[in-house]
Amino acid sequence: MSSSRIVFLMYHELEIAGRKLSQSEPGYVRYILPLETFRRQMAWIKESGWRGLNVGEALRYPAEPGVCITFDDGCETDLTAAAPLLRAFGFNATFYLTAGFLGTPGYLSARQVRDLDAQGFQIGCHSMTHPYLSDLTEPELKREVVDAKLQVEAIVGHPIEHFSCPGGRYDQRTLQMARHAGFATVANSKFYANSSRTNPYELGRVAMLRDLSIEEFGATCHGRGLWKKRLQHQARRSAQRVLGNHAYDHLRAVLLGNPASKP
Ligand SMILES: [Zn+2]
């Protein structure tokens, strides 16, 4: 086994001139990159001689330098904007889909999911309705993890092995449910690079924010400065624990000047 560390990048919807975003709240938009910013980041990877890998490829932890590219939520721009660019650069990626969003405005249709799958990209699952999984009762959790998996599998016609947690929230029950459902990995949004020693049910990922400079992007791909993000993240999570998820979202929305939203 190789001991190389790989940073997993987490993207969402991409912003295209003239196209309305699926949601418009500041808490959502800060995770949305303009297509040109995404293109510059992919160019950085290419020019650095690195590879862009999907989760399955990254889990083999190849010795050659690379980053893992993932998308959450299943927005239509996965197919219309991200996929053509990734193909042009010769990269792969994993697209985690929110099963219950498919076919609604701004999100992929079943046909588009099959198209993405047929192009060779990896399809993953991102729950049924995008709740914080750690807040759920057992039957609710089953629907979000097990039923969502079956629904995405029914669309693509083959097993789905990778799951990502909405809002990065999960607990031990979530991981157990995912394991029993047959998922091979679960990705969160904690700021650490992964290696062959990382528990595949606790894969860290770094959220890509729209105001990230290309220098910061490069540092992120190298896994530099993740400890700083980790400290900020821990401070936020402590506030969440004290206030509870709902009150925290409300407070965050007030601070950002708009109703609550989470990508
Ligand atoms: Zn999400």
Image (cartoon, rainbow, N blue to C red):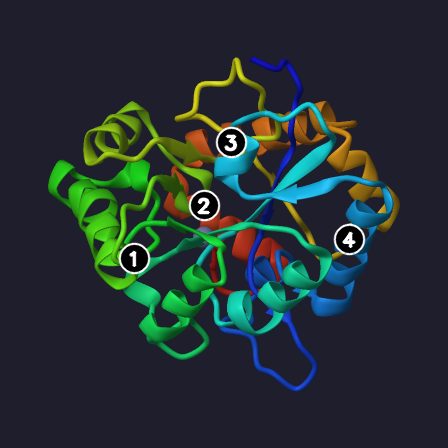
Badge 2 marks a residue whose secondary structure is: helix
Q: Residue at x 71, y 28 (%)?
A: 226
Q: Residue at x 58, y 64 (%)?
A: 83
- List the residue tagged with mark 3: 237
Mark sitting earlier along the chain (3/4): 4
Residue 41 has which mark? 4
Mark sitting earlier along the chain (3/2): 2
- In the figure, is residue 86 to the left or right of 201? right
- List the residue tagged with mark 1: 129
- In the figure, is residue 239 to the left or right of 186? right
Mark 3 → mark 4, Cα distance in angstroms: 28 Å
Residues at circles 1 and 2 in contact by the CB criterion of under 8 Å: no
Q: Residues within 10 Å of mark 4 (few under 14, many from 20)?
A: some
Against 251, is 200 above or below? above
The amino acid sitting under disc 2 is Gly
- In the figure, is residue 170 to the left or right of 8? left
Asked if residue 74 can be seen in this view, the reply is no
Asked whether mark 3 lies closer than 8 Å to ligand 1, one says no
Badge 3 marks a residue whose secondary structure is: helix
Counting from the top left corner in percent of width and height, residue 143 is at: 17, 48
The amino acid sitting under disc 1 is Thr
- List the residue tagged with mark 2: 167
